[in-house]
Image: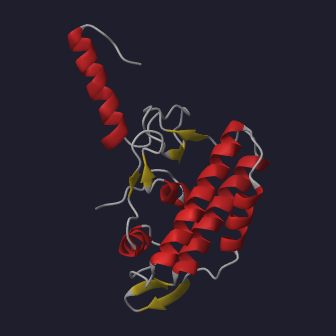
Amino acid sequence: MSFVFVSGNLALDFAGTLKWRRTRPEELLATPADLGRWAVAAGVTSEEPAVGAADLRWLCMLREAAYRLVTCAMDGRPWPEDDLRAVNEAAAEAPPQVRLTPGGLVRSGSAGAIASSVARSAAELLGEFTEQPGGLRIRECALEECTRIFIDRSRGGNRQWCGMEECGNRVKVANYRSRRSGTTRG
């Protein structure tokens, strides 16, 4: 399994590890090993950290708290206190340790370091979003089934899909088929 990093923010990419939330949820972090692989793929750690089932449950709870905070911010709703507390507590964990070696930079840490990185990323994103209303464009993918959230940094501010390879391509193929059959899909 490979992970996709198209959201423009570590916390949003982490939230994207639960796909298709509204229709047919697909969990990309099914095992502690998946969490370790995600940490390496995301650049949080250089090697897979030792994580257990309790760590995975904690980080999935953090993922959902961050996701709810972001969607509340997007909709202009107040943040749930429990979610705010979860993100702040995780942000207080020790971040990954960084060590410079002749071979390059090595990042290491535990589940707490992963949680810290994700929570700090969420806090910084939400802080920027609330401090500069309208300055940061946070969007949900336009593909109805997709629930991935991303930062729209396109020049025109008109990015529609989380990524072209999956969602954008699905829409284009569906539109092509609709045109060929005489109906269009929006």
Task: Identify the image quadrant of residue 138.
Answer: top right
Residue in the image at 36% along x and 75% along y: 33
Q: Is residue 48 left or right of residue 121?
A: left
Task: Identify the image quadrant of residue 171.
Answer: top left
The image's colour scheme reads secondary structure
Residue in the image at 22% along x and 11% along y: 181
The spot of residue 25 in percent (x, y) is 41, 48
Q: Residue furthest bottom?
A: 102
Q: Give the mark count.
A: 0
Quadrant showing the N terminus: bottom left
Q: Is residue 44 visible?
A: no
The spot of residue 73 in percent (x, y) is 70, 44
Task: Identify the image quadrant of residue 24.
Answer: top left
The spot of residue 178 in percent (x, y) is 27, 16
Q: Is residue 79 visible?
A: yes
Does 154 appear above or below 64?
Answer: above
Residue in the image at 25% along x and 7% along y: 182
Q: Residue furthest top?
A: 182
Does 177 appear above or below 117?
Answer: above
Does 185 appear above or below 30?
Answer: above
Does 136 appear above or below 12?
Answer: above
The spot of residue 69 in percent (x, y) is 67, 51
Quadrant showing the C terminus: top left
